[in-house]
Each structure stands twice: as structure tokens, then as C-alpha cells.
Amino acid sequence: MSPVMLKLLQKHTRCVHPSRAHLINAHGQCQWCHATLDELSLDVIHEVFGLKLINQDGKPKWVHIDQEMKVGAVVMPNSASRSKGHILFCGSGRYDVAVVASINPFILVSEGGDMMWAKTWKPKELTVINQASPEVMKVVMTRLELGH
């Protein structure tokens, strides 16, 4: 990680423990538990810098994300939502991400189409991390048409 990225992440990243939030030191580790920035900051990189890590020709590369909240956006709970315990889940499991199926009304669908959230999430509680593939969008739109 570049020194510039490390400095930027240090300003925005906190390692959250039950007792309090701990600052990140100059080595990119939590001052209390020594977790690394790589383990702590992907959500910050998505939210603050609008970047995602991809594999290009076998090498990691940071690319900009289209962060517009629109149909087809792949989203995850933002750090504020997660700190309040708000996660994507249903009775049968937990989901890391969901896809925006509709803006008005705001509806999310799991990538596999097995779960739909119609009233529990607001756009401000989510971070756009990618755009869904055409295959995933077909599944999402089929689930949206089927409804509950």
C-alpha cells in the first residue's frame, strides 16, 4: 500500500472494538489489536475513495467504482450501518451484498435471487461497491417480478 493511501486511510479508519474505536498507527495496524488496514479498511476504501480492488493480468489494481445508487448497483451496508449492527440477513442466512432492483420504491435483492428487502433499507445506509453482471441482473429482475 502506498504511503499516501496509508495516510488517507489513517484519517478515515478506526478499528471498532466493544469498548472504543482505536486509531490506526503509521504501520497500518490497529493500536490495540494490531489488525492490519487490509483487514479493516475495504469498506472505507469503497465509501471514502470510491475504489475497488481488481485482478488485472495477475496483479492487483485499484479502479474507480460507479457509486451512483441506481438499478443494478451492488451494495453493502456502510460502516455506520454495520457499527449499529444493521446487516443484510434473513431467517436462513446472512448476505455480504445485495443488488438494487428498484429505486422507487427502494428494493434490494440478493445476487442469487433468494431474498428481497423491500422496507428495511434506505440508500443512505448502503455503499455501492460494484455493478451487477447481466446474468445477476436477470436473476434479480426475475425475483422482482415474482414479488414476495
Image (tube, helix red, strand yellow):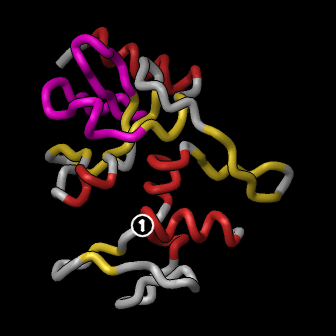
Vertical order, 148 against 110 (above or below): above
Toward the right, the furthest residue is 57
**In the image, is residue 114 part of the stretch drawn in magenta?**
yes
Name the residue located 28 percent from the left edge and 34 percent from the top edge.
124
Front-most of residues 12 and 125: 12
Vertical order, 126 against 11 (above or below): above
**In the image, is residue 92 part of the stretch drawn in magenta?**
no
Front-most of residues 83 and 10: 10
Front-most of residues 139 and 73: 73
Name the residue located 74 percent from the left edge and 58 percent from the top edge.
60
Name the residue located 22 percent from the left edge and 13 percent from the top edge.
105
The image position of residue 46, as x and y in percent, is: 50, 48
Front-most of residues 19 and 71: 19
7 relative to 42 in the view: left or right: right
The image position of residue 41, as x and y in percent, is: 47, 64
Among the 4 quarters of the image, the one containing residue 34: bottom left
Q: Amino acid at mark 1?
A: Thr
Circle 1 residue: 13
126 relative to 138 in the view: left or right: left
Vertical order, 129 against 19 (above or below): above
Number of numbered discs overlaid on the protein picture? 1
> What span is colored magenta in the figure?
100-127
Quadrant in which the C terminus appears:
top left
101 relative to 20 in the view: left or right: right
Count neighbours of disc 1 (C-alpha within 10 A) and say few if under 14, some if 14 to 19, many if 20 or more.
many
Quadrant in which the N terminus appears:
bottom right
Name the residue located 19 percent from the left edge and 50 percent from the top edge.
86
20 relative to 52 in the view: left or right: left
The image position of residue 82, as x and y in percent, is: 25, 55
The image position of residue 65, as x and y in percent, is: 58, 36
